[in-house]
Image (cartoon, rainbow, N blue to C red):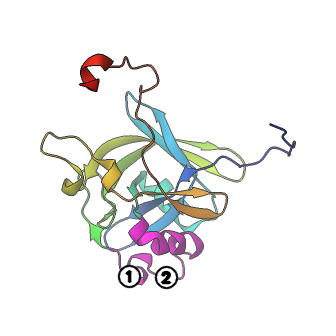
Amino acid sequence: MAKQKWKGSTLLAPVPSVLVSCGDTENANIITIGWTGIVASHPPKLYISVRPERFSYDIIKNSGEFCVNIPTTDIIKAVDYCGVKSGRECDKFADCKLTKEESFEVKCPSIGECPIVLECKTSQIVPLGTHDMFIADILAVSVDENLVDDKGRLMLEKANLCAYAHGDYFALGKKIGDFGFSVRKRKNLKRNRK
């Protein structure tokens, strides 16, 4: 497959498009973040990268807390709005008709319309150029009960999650495998053919 060489850039796709809530119940804000991910399993840690000039930057830096709210395709317009509008000029919760919910471990509210929320406490801030990386401990995860089956299994395939790729939003599509499927031994094929 022939390829062109481009200069180094942020062309990693797809990435999550999450809503990060911060502040407190009275003075809460939401910022859309695409630069996020898990950095460690034990203890569970993630990062978000935020430009210092963004309104949420000082809120997160001063409080040391934030929630990573994983949105669905149903609220994709709010995801976009919270990424292009500034909390200095508007109340994003009100404008997008999003529900502030009390979090379990942090003071900032989570977003009721998001089926999964990771509550975080900052452990380190790393300046990286245009963005500072907030590395945080994941103190708690809340999951919509509708996404948990009677055996306690998380059914993310029912969540209608979305992703961001180079300026566009996408609904996640059909499942094409699961972890370890490429090396899993097949069951007795003769028995399965009967």
Q: Would residue 87 be counted in the magenta stretch?
A: yes
| Residue found at x 32% / y 67% | 113
Left or right of 146? Residue 32 is right
| Residue found at x 54% / y 82% | 89
Estimate how packed mark 1 is, as few (under 14), some (14 to 19) or many (20 or more) residues with alpha carbons within 10 Å.
few
Q: Position of residue 32 (x, y in %)?
A: 52, 63
Q: Would residue 81 be counted in the magenta stretch?
A: yes
SS category of the residue bearing label 2 = loop
In this figure, which residue is indicated by the disc labeled 2?
90
Q: Position of residue 29 (x, y in %)?
A: 44, 69
The image quadrant of residue 92 is: bottom left
Please tell me which residue lies in front, 104 or 160: 160
In this rendering, the answer to whether 79 lies above or below 34 is: below
Whether residue 26 is visible here, answered yes or no, is yes
Please tell me which residue lies in front, 93 or 70: 70
| Residue found at x 30% / y 73% | 99
